[in-house]
């Protein structure tokens, strides 16, 4: 008898409640509790350890099943927004969608899911056909100070769409570039084009005080772009080490060579761009196993190379910051090694990690990204057969 991997997850998570008993925290009165000590972490004393919360999220309604998780974001109220790809559902997973239904489960979940810190589902909407120009390949999600939700896709022809919190389309940010078929590596690059002709958005971040939006244009190109948030006007852009757009080559980047010098151009994919509290710009060169740091004007500051011997997919998928005002630590999502690396944000030194490859609670398979909330909880999203989200709670050492 055959069962899909996602069908097994509910059972493994339930068993994890028992399996994690050795990872509980002893309280002052000697009673064992689940690891909920995030507020007690003194980040000035170093990075904490992390334990999975096996009860997060709560079971979804309507027989819904999450698919490949490509975007996650924690908003100002510590709600967790999850973007998944409904059309990545496989045959056995969609048995309840058939006519007549083959079994009681399952139905693909909407593309956008909003959870609170306790794992309760608050909002769900979206998916192919939900709005004109819905992304061909959902890839990133974030919110602005007004609570509006921004969604983008990674394929040529996808743009940034802006929605109300309940899913009503507000606007389409950008012009649609030509659509291409086939792998991104075989599609033509144009790193010199600067009008708002988006050819796929790997990730983006807002600087609302400056009314700017930073875009990781890293699936068909190899650069970071900055646009005026109100007019869409191009303002500036750069490649690896702050290379001007005019000097970035339009040929595919050579394969990663761990014994050679770092490449002068990004490798696919330039997977994230995130701004820190001290006005630095962090760019993930996933295929190059590195994070590069810039000023907002694109002046190169430093780079952090992690697990450089990794040859496929890459180690630098998404960065997130610890919740202390200094943001002393950087969380780095590693898709290939199924780990979240914890780095000293000033030096790039690896000071901790959690996760390893596997399908049980607390293990990770093709972890696409990791984001943190105001208490230092880290939420992960996985693609491929995993198609799940998990919550990891910091525990003081």
Image (tube, grey):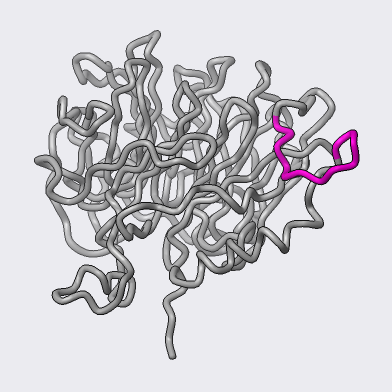
Could you tell me which residue is drawn at 58 percent across and 51 percent down? 55
Q: Which image quadrant: the N terminus?
A: bottom left
Identify the residue at horizontal 30%, vertical 18% (top origin): 235
In the rendered image of this protein, does residue 370 appear above or below residue 193? below
Residue at the far top: name it.
Answer: 209
Taking depth in this image into account, of 136 and 303 the one nearest to the observer is 136
230 is within the stretch colored magenta? no
Left-right relation of 112 to 4: left
373 sits to left or right of 265? right
Query: To which quarter of the image does residue 231 belong?
Result: top left
User: What residue appears at the point 25 percent right and 42 percent down from the top-left corner?
Assistant: 125
Q: Where is residue 186 shown, x and y percent of the image?
A: 27, 61
Front residue of this view, candidates 293 and 375: 375
Between 367 and 217, the one nearer to me in the picture: 367
Query: Residue, x 78% and y 49% (percent of image)?
Result: 24
Image: magenta residue range: 27-38
Magenta-drawn stretch, dominant element (helix, strand or loop): loop
How far across and how far down the image is residue 190, in percent? 25, 42
189 left or right, relative to 177:
right
Q: Depth check: give the residue in front, 201 or 83.
A: 83
Q: Quadrant of residue 144?
A: top left
């Amino acid at each position: 008898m055959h069962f899909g991997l996602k069908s097994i997850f509910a059972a493994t998570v339930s068993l994890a409640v028992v399996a994690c008993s050795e990872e509980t925290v002893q309280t002052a009165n000697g009673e064992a509790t689940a690891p909920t000590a995030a507020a007690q972490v003194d980040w000035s004393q170093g990075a904490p350890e992390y334990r999975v919360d096996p009860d997060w999220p709560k079971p979804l309604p309507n027989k819904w099943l999450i698919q490949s998780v490509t975007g996650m974001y924690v908003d100002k109220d510590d709600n967790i927004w999850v973007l998944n790809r409904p059309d990545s559902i496989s045959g056995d997973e969609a048995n309840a969608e058939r006519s007549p239904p083959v079994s009681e489960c399952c139905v693909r979940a909407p593309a956008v899911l909003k959870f609170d810190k306790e794992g309760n589902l608050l909002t769900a909407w979206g998916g192919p056909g939900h709005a004109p120009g819905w992304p061909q390949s959902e890839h990133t999600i974030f919110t602005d100070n007004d609570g509006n939700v921004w969604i983008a896709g990674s394929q040529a022809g996808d743009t940034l769409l802006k929605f109300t919190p309940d899913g009503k389309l507000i606007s389409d940010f950008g012009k649609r570039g030509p659509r291409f078929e086939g792998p991104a590596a075989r599609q033509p690059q144009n790193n010199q084009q600067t009008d708002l002709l988006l050819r796929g958005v790997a990730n983006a971040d807002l600087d609302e005080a400056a009314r700017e939006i930073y875009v990781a244009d890293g699936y068909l190109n190899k650069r970071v772009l900055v646009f005026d948030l109100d007019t869409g006007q191009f303002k500036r852009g750069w490649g690896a080490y702050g290379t001007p757009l005019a000097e970035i080559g339009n040929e595919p980047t050579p394969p990663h060579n761990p014994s050679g010098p770092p490449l002068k151009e990004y490798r696919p994919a330039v997977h994230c761009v995130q701004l820190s509290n001290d006005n630095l710009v962090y760019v993930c060169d996933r295929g190059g196993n590195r994070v590069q740091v810039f000023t907002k004007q694109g002046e190169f500051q430093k780079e952090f190379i992690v697990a450089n011997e990794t040859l496929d997919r890459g180690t630098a998928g998404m960065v997130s910051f610890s919740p202390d005002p200094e943001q002393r630590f950087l969380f780095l999502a590693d898709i290939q090694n199924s780990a979240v690396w914890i780095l000293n944000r000033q030096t790039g030194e690896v000071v901790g990690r959690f996760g390893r490859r596997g399908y049980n609670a607390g293990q990770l398979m093709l972890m696409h990204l990791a984001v943190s909330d105001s208490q230092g909880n880290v939420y992960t999203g996985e693609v491929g057969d995993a198609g799940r989200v998990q919550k990891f709670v910091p525990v003081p050492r």
